[in-house]
Image (cartoon, helix red, strand yellow):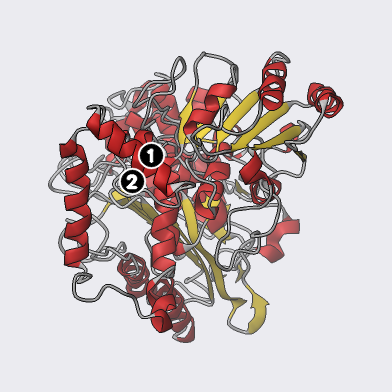
Amino acid sequence: TAIFAVEAGTDVLLILPDEDAAIEALVHAVENGRISEERINYSVRKILGYKFDLGLVENRFVDLKNIRDIVATPEHLGIAKQIARKSITVLKRDSVISILPLPSRERDGNRLSKKILNIVIADVESYRTEIQRNGNPWTNEPVGNYFTTMLKRRTSNVEQVTVDPSWNKMSFDSLLKKAKSADIILLPIFSKARSGAGMFGIGSDVTNFIKQLSELNKPTVALALGSPYVLSVVPKANAYVCSYSDCEASTEATVEALFGEIPTQGKLPINIPNMFAFGEGIDISQSVLRKDKPENVGFNSDSLALVDSVINHAIQDSAFPGAQVCVVKDGAIVLNKSFGSYEYAYPTSHISNQSMYDLASLTKVIATTSAVMKLYDEQQLGLDDLVTKYIPEFGNHGKEKITIRNLLLHNSGLPAFKRLYAMCKSPQEVLDSVFQTELIYKTGDSTVYSDFGFITLGKIVERISGQTLDEYCRKNFFEPLGMKQTMFNPSESLWTNIAPTEYDSLLRKKLVRGVVHDENAYTLGGVSGHAGLFSTASELAIFMQMLTNGGNFNGKQFLKQETIKFFTTKKGAKSTRALGWDTKSVEGYSSAGKLFSENSFGHTGFTGTSIWADPEREIFVIFLTNRVYPTRANTKISGVRPAVHEAVIRSLTNFKTIK
């Protein structure tokens, strides 16, 4: 084992079962030429160099009184978790049925009937207890219990059976019978390769059982929580997973990989004879969001608390009565919190993570732009298609040359908006007015953010798809993503769970709650390409995870990765606009603040909502408020948005400005 480890690139051999045997084996390997003396010298020089840099030549020992201040700090444990996650290696020999990710309680209700049988295999020395760990409540538990507990946090339909090295044939036959009724078999092997231990110390009876188990042809995942060589005792499995360790960080990372909560990118550091070669490893993208400690993805929890301070101060300053914020990095939710109340007058009516907000112009990107992207992917429309191809009545007053691209870039020449609700009595009258509108500048000569352009885009989606915009988005995005609180026109039964917006003294003569705030969208029936969508920060995080994960979520491809990249990239030097989306201003004010990278993309909504994503740091922030309550005259949100985003970036442990 020591020889294999050195050949794989290890510099330090720790917790060896037999130090003398390891030293003797390495000396012999150098003497017979298997390992060069230069290879040994390389590692020795590296170790001595680090010791010198750390001052260990003069001060060899650590002050035990201060050990807790310098060992196992949250930052250290976070780095250990990151290393464990990046090391997880997934291997497969054949193009067989994919069973990863495993079904989980949160996302796969229809698949939870599948029975998962978790058969724990351990060698004689590993069988008795979990490895000793300081402060670990699992220290004296049977091996595999922590692994199974991590499984049960995600799905209740799992049964653990630990193979006892003392089992007889009757015991194995009974387990084989149980395996026949299982839908999925997990085979975690806790074993370390030991000199003179034969098949890694697990015994011939166990290896024979594993062969019989393979012959059942059940969907099987073999896992090596220790030496990857133990996978050689499993002749046939749908997937092989290596974590190289059974410590907490590695065990947790293994289970996260099984359920698609992290991407897998590890590569095999050795050859497994007749099975897998050095460097093999399948890259699998993350398929779902997970909740995680800030330190595990590079945040400092104490610094991240500054976000709370910014929002609480804004509420005290009456910038808005309540808010939701969700911060995601590397596919992990590190902050998902609600603040304040629905209304100033009722401070005990607390906002929760299930409270819904009127998204206003976030509708433009979450609904309309996404629908256009999907139709673009399916080649049902082209960006340079004339609008008149789909809406012939649009082509008047110089608008006949306007393209879909112009509408997305807000450079069509259409005005920002008009108070059509004061002039029109029906949705059709509003649309007729939009389509008959005259240009205020020559198409392509300038950029004017326009609601009219997105009202038109929404109708193009409807005419191509044959569905209403809300129906199209619900069927193609919201339902398959599990976004149950994202919708147009929420039913009246939900209104008490929705943050109120403005007191409308002109059109509706009442406080607006549960009905779209935008008057033109209201006159259009609540469904429009420019406004009308309601949601929560938690559900928008699902949508943004799909976008920032290359269009993939829960194993389903919603949009092409290259399409997302194309639509979210700035299209010219004279404007910050991308296609539908906005990008961060390099100079002057940006609601994203000054610290998000230059290629960040996002959007805001008039009611006090915003989304910003930083692809370089793999961070996105969703910030929802009802700042227009009770009046739109309140503009304090303009200072709060950048403060929130800057607080998030400053809380990174490796914070530095990215241009």
Quadrant of the image occupied by residue 527 = top right
Q: Quadrant of the N terminus?
A: top left
Task: List the residue tagged with mark 1.
Answer: 2
Q: In the depicted view, which residue is nearer to us: 620 or 151?
A: 151
Task: List the residue tagged with mark 2.
Answer: 581
Amino acid type at circle 1 is: Ala
Amino acid type at circle 2 is: Trp
Q: Secondary structure at mark 1?
A: helix
Disc 2 versus disc 1: distance between alpha carbons?
55 Å
Q: Quadrant of the C terminus?
A: bottom left
Q: Secondary structure at mark 2?
A: loop
Residue 526 location, x and y as percent? 58, 49
Residue visible at 50% across and 45% down in the picture: 245
Residue 456 location, x and y as percent? 41, 37
Q: Residues within 10 Å of mark 1 (few under 14, many from 20)?
A: many
Residue visible at 33% across and 23% down in the picture: 382
Q: Residues within 10 Å of mark 2 (few under 14, many from 20)?
A: many
